[in-house]
Amino acid sequence: MEDPPFVIGVSGASGAAIALKVLEALRAARQPVALVVTDGAVAVLREECGVGPEALRSLARDVYSDHDLGAPIASGSRPTRGMAVVPCSVNTVAKIALGLADTLLTRAAHVHLKERRTLVVVPRETPMPSTLLRHLLTLSEAGVVVLDAAPPYYLHPRSVDDQTAYLAGKVLDHLGVPHRLYVGWKAGPE
């Protein structure tokens, strides 16, 4: 019997490099992944990372089409170890918050909500309009980890890659996966 996977959903928001770094770290940690990449994410991957979806697919054990509502991860009877939607578009945030499960990514998120499993969303939008803030509040109140893609200035990142590694590490922190993507802040003597 295979170990339950982590479900990683990649939607069409800016920040595709974060998803790539999360997947690379899960692979390095030898963690099984079930991957769903939306059509919008494919365009963002090409624009921001210069790669196609095959770069992500090669990092997952199971790969599902976002149009496949019959995939195993669409059912609560399929055990998983948690889910992250990274990056999470405004449209995807709204669908999850409103319970619209019309794609595999949103259905898998709904399953994680109803089964009370860990669900992390990484919205990438600025400024955030009131409607998005309301949807994020709804998700937070339902127990979802809303992990804003904010840079860790206190760690003095030297590059975008440092910031990306930090954000991927925060996702892994909430999924309970040990990593070495960043070293957290350490208080000095007072």
Image: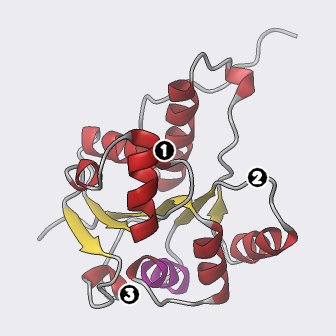
Q: Quadrant of the N terminus?
A: bottom left
Query: Predominant secondary structure in magenta?
Result: helix
Residue that protrudes farthest toward the top in the picture: 189
Q: Which mark is residue 76?
A: 3
Q: Residue at x 60, y 82 (%)?
A: 95
Q: Are marks 3 and 1 in contact (CB under 8 Å)?
A: no
Which residue type does callout 1 highlight? Ile
Please, what secondary structure does the residue beneath circle 1 have? helix
On the question of residue 180 being in view, the answer is yes
The range drawn in magenta is 106-114
Furthest residue toward left: 1
Of badges 2 and 1, nearer the viewer stands 2
- The amino acid pointed to by label 3 is Gly
Circle 1 residue = 18
Query: CA–CA distance between discs 3 and 2?
Result: 33 Å
Task: Give the residue at x 41% y 50%.
Answer: 45
Residue lying at 75% horizontally and 77% vertically, measured from the top left: 138
Residue at image location 20% in from the left, 66% down from the top: 62
**Crowd tier of the residue under label 1, counting other residues whose Cα lies within 10 Å: few below 14, some 14–19, many 20 or above:** many
